[in-house]
Image: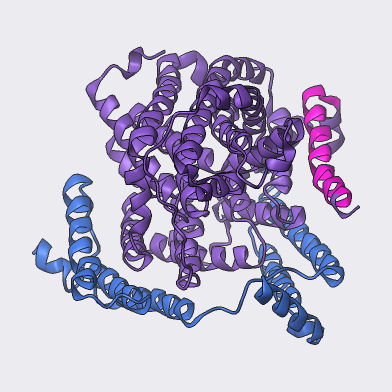
Chain colours: A blue, B purple
Amino acid sequence: MNNVRNKKRANKSLPFFFKDEFIVSFIIVFISIILLISTFSFDIVPPILNRGIQPATFPKALLILIISLTLIIYYLSIKSPWKIGKKLPKTFFLTLLSFLIFVIISKTLDFFLAISVLSIFVSYNWGERRIFYLLLVSIIFPILVFIFFETILGLRFPPGIITNLYYY
Amino acid sequence: MLTPLFSSKLLIVLLFGTLFGLILGVLPGLGPTTGGALILPFTMTLDPLSAIVLLTSIYCAGTYGGAITAVLINTPGTPAAAATCLDGYPLAQKGEAGRALGMATVSSTVGGIFSVIILVFFAPLLAKLAYEFGQPEYFALAIFGLTMLSSIGEGSPIKNLIAGAFGILISTIGKDFMTSIDRFTYGINELSVGIGFIPVVVGLFAISEMLTQSTLLDQVFKRVALKAVKLPTKDDYKKTWKTILRSSGIGSFIGVLPAEGGTVASLIGYSEAKRFSKNPEEFGKGSIEGIAGAEAANNAATGGAMVPTLALGIPGSATTAVILTGLIIHGVRPGPDLFREQPDFLYGIFGAMLIANVLFFIFGFFGAKIFARITLVPNKILWPMIFAVSVCGTYSLSQSIIDVWIMLFFGVLGFFMRRFGFSVVPVIIGLILGELVEGTLRQSLVIFDGNWLMFLTRPIALTFFILSLIALAFPLLRSKKQKK
C-alpha cells in the first residue's frame, strides 16, 4: 500500500512525459497510428464484390476508437493518476530474459532443450537450489510432457538436436 | 437429462474434470479460465460431448475451489472468490475454518444447482427467441455484449472498452473472411490464417500470471489449520437460507448478462447479503452470511453464463469464452439450431453440470484438507511445469512454433496490461466476438443497402442498442455515486 502511495507521489513530481500514464497512452496511440496508416495499403475490393463496407473500414474504425478512448483515459489520468504497483524486481526481468532465451534456443537448437533451459533458469532464479527439484522441472517433467504429447496426442515436435535423437 | 451421461467414459471425464477443476481453483493465479485454456488442446482426442463435459466440470469445480484458499490463506484461488476472503478468513482465524468451508461448500452447491435449473429452463427459451434474430439483431446483440465489458470488475470502464476493441482488432488479422484480402499480415504467411484463440488466451492468462508470480516471490501466506469441514448447523441454515437463495438468483441473473461472470456476481451477492442482513456489523469480521452470499452467487453465475453461450454463442464470462472455443473447435455451432438439432448433446452438458456440482460438494466436504495442501507446492517448481504444458499445448493445436511465440508475446503484453489497470478478459471476449460483430455489420449493411439508420427500424436491434447505452452509462453513474 505504502509502495503504491510512494510511487503515486513520485509519479506526480515527474515531468508529464516521464509519467506512466503518458508513456502507456503514447505507446497505444503511436502503435494505433502506425496500424491505421497500414490499413490504407489494404487492397480495395471492386464494388461488385464489396459486402457492405471495404475490408479496411472496420479495422480503421476500431483503431480510431482505440485512439479516442486512449486520449480520454490520458485526460482523465491528469486529474486522478493511475494506481501502479511497486517497482519490478530482478526476478521479473530474469523471467523475461528466460523467454528470450527460450525463443533463441527453440529457433536455433531444439524445442525441448529450450523448455528445459527455461525451466531450470526460472526455477533457480526463483530460489530453488535443491538438485532433485531442479532436475525434476528441467528434465523429468519435460520428458513426461514429451512422451504424453507424442504418444497420446500423436504430436510431432519440430526437429532439433535432442528431438532428432528420438525420431531418428 | 442424465441419460447421455450413463457411460463409463463420460463419468470418468466428469470425475477427472471436477478433481482437476478443484486443484486449479485452489491454486492462486490459475483457475478455471486458464485451466480450461490449458486443457483445450487435450480435448481434441475426445468426442465433442466428452470435451465440453470436461470443460464445464472444470468450470463448476474451479469456481468453488477458489473458496478453499480464500478461507484458509486469505488469498482467493480465483477472482470470483475475492469476496469470500472478507469473511471466510476472519472466521477461520477464530478457529472456525471447518464451519466457514462447510458453509462455502453448501452455498456453492445450492447456487450451482439453482443455476443449472435456470439454464435448463431459460436457455431453450432464449434460443427460441433467437429464431427471430437476423443479422442486424445479432450485430446489436454483439455490441451489447461488448458494451457490458465496460462494467467488468472494478477497473476503469474505458480501459475495459479499449481492451475489448483491441480483442476485436486481433480478430481482423489475417485474410478477410468475406473477400479473402490480407489484413495486418505484412507478408507473413502464418498470419494469413489469423491469430488463434489458444495462443492468446494461454498467453494472457497463464504466461502473464507466471510473470506476475515472478514479482510476488517474497509473499508469505499465513495458513490457518483445518481439522475437518463441518456441515452448517441448524442455526446457520436459519441465518443463511434466504441469503443463499437471494444470491443464487443474483448470480444466475448476472451470469446470463453477456461478459459478466462470477467475480461481479459474488461482489453483488455479498453486498446484497450485507444490505439485507440483521447483523450487517458482523460483515468483514467473520459473518457466515457473508460467506454464503458470495459463494452462492459466484457458483450460480456458472449456469447463468452458459445460457447466452449455448443459446446465442455470446460468452457469459471469460471461462465460457474458453468453453465456446471448445464448442467451435469441435465443430459444434452454438445457437438456436443446436437446441433443435442436438438436444441430447445439450442435455448431456446440463446433466454434467448438475453432477459436477454434487461431485465438488463430496470432494470439497471430504477432501478440502488435502486440496488445501496443494497450495504448499512452491511456485518455483509449479510455474516452470505450467510453462512446459502451456508451450506444448499451444504448439499442439496447429503444430506451429509461431503460435508459441504469439503466446509469449501476449503473455508479456497481458502482464503490462494488468499492471497498468487494463483487464485481459475483454481482449478474449472481443477476440471471440470480433468475427460476429464485423460479419453481421457487413451483412446488415448489404441488407440495408448501406443505410445505417435502418438499424433503428428493427425493434429488437433498437432494444439492444438502448441496453448498450445503459451498459455504458451504468459504470459512469456508479463511479459518480461512489465519489459522492
**Left or right for B7, reference B244:** left
Question: Residue B394: where, in percent of width, then height?
Answer: 37, 55
Q: Position of residue B453 (x, y in %)?
A: 87, 35
Q: B324 or B316: nearer the eye?
A: B316
Is B459 part of what is drawn in magenta? yes
Q: Is residue B477 toward the left or the right of residue B232 in the image? A: right
Vertical order, A100 against A163 (above or below): below
Q: In percent of the image, x 45 and y 76: which residue is there?
A: A96
Main secondary structure type of the part rendered in magenta = helix
Query: x%, y% of residue B287?
Result: 62, 39
Instruction: Compare residues B23 and B161 and report the one nearer the observer.
Output: B23
> Residue A56, can we see it?
no
Bounds of the magenta segment: B457-481
Residue B229 is covered by the magenta coloring: no
Q: Does B236 sit above or below residue B390?
A: above
Instruction: Using the rendered image of the protein, determine whether residue A6 is visible from the camera's viewpoint.
Output: yes
Identify the residue at the far left of this view. A168
Report whether A144 appears left or right of B474.
left
Residue lying at the far right of the rendered structure: B484
Q: Quadrant of residue B351?
A: top left
Give B215 or A3, whichever is nearer the viewer.
A3
Residue at point 44% right, 29% down?
A: B231
Which quadrant: the N terminus of chain B? top left
Between B380 and B126, the one nearer to me in the picture: B380
Residue depicted at x 50% and y 22%? B113
